[in-house]
Amino acid sequence: MDSDRVRQFFLEFFEARGHRRAEPASLVPAGDPSVLFTTAGMQQFKPYYLGTGTPPATRLTTCQRCFRTSDIENVGHTARHLTFFEMLGNFSFGDYFKEEAIAWSLEFSDELGIDRDRVWISIFGGDDEVPADDEATAMWREHGFPPERIVPLSRADNFWGPAGPTGPCGPCSELYYDMGSDTGCRTAECAPGCDCDRFMEYWNLVFVQYSMAEDGGLSPLPSPSIDTGMGLERIAAVTQGALTVFESDAFRPLIEAGERLSGVSYESSPAARRALRTIAEHARGAAFLVMDGILPGNEGRDYVLRRIIRRAVQQGVAIGIEEPFLASLCDLVIDRMGDAYPELAARRDAVRTVTDDEEARFRRTLDTGMGILDEALRRARDAGTELPAEVAFELHDTYGFPFDLTREIAQESEMSVDEERFEHLMAAQRERARQAQRGGEWGEGPGDIDTFQRDTAEIVSDFVGYEKLEVFTVIRALRTLDDGRILLKLAESPFYAESGGQIADEGWIHTDAGKLAVTEVVKFDDDQVIVARLEEGEAANRDRAKAMVNSVRRHQTASNHTATHLLHNALRLLVDDAIRQAGSAVRPDKLRFDFTTRRAPTDDELRQVEELVNRRIVEDHPVRAFETTKDYAAELGALAFFEDKYGETVRVLEVDDFSRELCGGTHVSSTAAIGLFKITASQSVGANTRRIEAVTSAKAIEYYRGLEETLAAAADELRTDPDRVPAAARKLGEQVTELKEALRSGAGDGGGLVDELVGAAEEVEGAQLVAARVDGLSGDDMLQLCDTLRERLGEAAVVLAAAKDDRVAVTVALSDGLVGRGLHAQDVLRAVTEPLGGKGGGRPTLARGGGGNVGAVDDALAAGRERLRAELSV
């Protein structure tokens, strides 16, 4: 079977056994900050296992797209490691358990034509704290598996969860396919658990049967559950008789395209095989990450996308692909997978543009990296040492220059790299990455609010706050925490729970005997928990209550939320229709809207956006909300966003005929109720991501009043009228420029100050060292002076300190060649700022900082000079 048929056959198999097909989640987890990406099929179902949410059915099945960062460096080197993959899964929430899960896994394997004699099983072998899973062992035996093909493994291999101190957990069994004794390590002892490629794990059955307490003790769950995951690419390889996933239909067309582009055969060498595997795998990953709204950057998910694109490009260059190629491979990914993922096909233009732009950028980076590496190799050769690991790591980490390429170039020069030290540096980096991923499949154990929800899950609060801000109701559950907070559920609640970027309502709950102030409302699927504090008297379960939303605060919040939709519409109309929401925060005092874009809006475009939003407000358009099916909403053109989670029935927020989005928030009934809209800030918050902040209604009026007061104060300072402030400020600026030019008259190339510093430069081990006090120069002046000195001196290290009032500014600049020798500007800066009682930071070639001890400037410069001498003399 090809991959598409296996995917469909799996879902149909479990639908025929009472499972409901669930929609796959985005690669960006909805409401789960514990992980960067969706790493497993069950991740979107965590609330159901934790007992904080109610599943739509007790049996579900999915094909979930997943991404795991921990395997990036293994991609291309092994037969099965992938970053992006599809996970087939069947799930039971308190319904069936081990017997059915085991039987169906074998039945499905049989229907795929898998030879059961080549299937091996792993089970949890137990340890001092958790007993062995003898129950599963007996079941596998009943299905005809001999003891020698049932392998016990440790807790690290075959026991899942919890990642936090408490929570659901349980043993697992895995199904392995024996690729044959002529593969892998070829030892007699080889079995599942061996790191070689002989046994390919293709299905993992997790038996969620315990709850772990804080002391590590286990207690049986009243309703055990099942979570399984089968890698589509792996099972497709098995069914197609392929020895690796890369020889299956999921990858083979991409590898063949790489062969045509490079003119290199897959079988020609291990290096060619590694390169072609890498570019094929990373093309798939890049296409799906861009589909889910991620753009290349320097942090978090954005950095991961940048890393796999660069890794693919480097491997392509290494086998001779001279022209940009990744976008064409992503096109092929879309052609092959667009039917299964229509949104991938819809984002074709974005995928092509993003990958093409990033490849072009990195090809320029490769040229830069080669310059730094050549210089570092020359220095190391002259010194008779191997290439310092710090240089290789800096190239890898700062410039995206892969270590494999650094090592290969060094070998061509008959030199080596300190690989042990490099691996130590990389291990530290990987541990930081694992910390970002930690939380695993289960995330942290439930806190007080989660525990209350789990204990009261059968009591569901009915939210009526779209229609009512005040309601007579009954307290149906209540718990007082040690810190005085009260957790409760109302039969009917008018309070909006924080979700979709909108802050929760605040308000009051009156009972016959007391008064509560509502401070927080936490959402759990179609339920909520209210957090309150007792202001008067007392409150108890089953009390009659009057619940009242703070209506002023609600109106301000609703105004900002509707304005957010208008802002989004205006940006797509006036700036770029490819703009996608990347996050939002709707509060009573302001709104924040994050969006992905390939360029920053101009000031003129932002003025037009602001004008269009205010025009929509003045025109008094109706705002309507209605519920419909997700498919019909898509037909209507309603926008949906990756960070939100939607069910089959969705709520559509429509502003006349120009804005239509899926939204569960609260809104005004007409745009005129917003009153006024004003953009207060526009800035970058990451690569290809912008943020706009704005105010509406009374806060917008306050904003303009504040500007009036500021203008009046400026007029007083300039001794002029408010309408003449621009002219007075312009005149003052001209005077300042004249003064700065006079001050800087000796700082230009060939000027007196430059000549003086060049003449005072000290030569140390082939480098020129300048450490000087330049009081009176600004930060920009110091940067210009550093550039001029490096141009005049060549291989140079420059340390400048300028005192002004009670502060000292410091700038350290190093030439690229010194960085290649292992120096780092930030290390030198640290030595200079320590006597000054300050700190700073920067890049290898440039660092800036300062301190408050003006009397220690000379000592600080002396410390920097000594640090440089020591570094240069190593």
Image: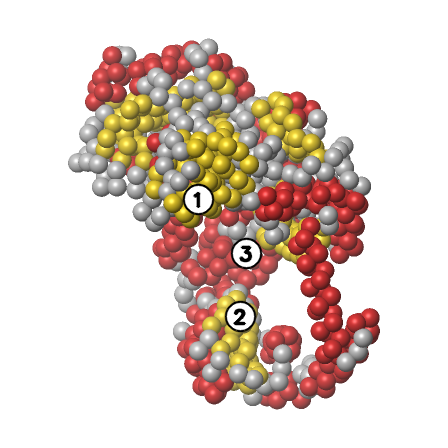
> In 3D space, how far apart are the residues under numbered discs 2 and 1 (Cα atoms)?
54 Å
Task: Tell me whether the residue at label 2 lies in contact with that at label 1, contact meaning CB atoms closer than 8 angstroms.
Answer: no
218 lies above or below 508: above
Which one is in front, 61 or 705?
Answer: 705
- At label 1, the amino acid type is Leu
Res 47 → quadrant: top left
Lower sequence index among marks 3 and 2: 3
Res 443 → quadrant: top left
Which one is in front, 393 or 135?
Answer: 135
The structure residue drawn at horizontal position 57% and vertical position 37%, both measured from the top left corner, is 469
Q: Which mark is residue 516?
A: 1
Q: Position of residue 212 (x, y in %)?
A: 27, 35
Lower sequence index among marks 2 and 1: 1
Q: Mark 3 sits on what residue?
A: 399
The structure residue drawn at horizontal position 47% and vertical position 61%, both measured from the top left corner, is 391
Which one is in front, 462 or 304?
Answer: 462
Label 2 sits on a secondary structure element that is strand
The residue mark sitting in front, 2 or 1, is 1
The residue mark sitting in front, 3 or 1, is 1
- At label 2, the amino acid type is Ala
The structure residue drawn at horizontal position 46% and vertical position 40%, both measured from the top left corner, is 510
Q: Mark 2 sits on what residue?
A: 847
The structure residue drawn at horizontal position 61% and vertical position 52%, both measured from the top left corner, is 589
> In 3D space, how far apart are the residues under numbered discs 3 and 1 (Cα atoms)?
56 Å
Crowding near pointer 2: few (<14 within 10 Å), some, many (20+)?
many
Label 1 sits on a secondary structure element that is strand
- Is any atom of residue 713 visible in this view? yes
Crowding near pointer 1: few (<14 within 10 Å), some, many (20+)?
many
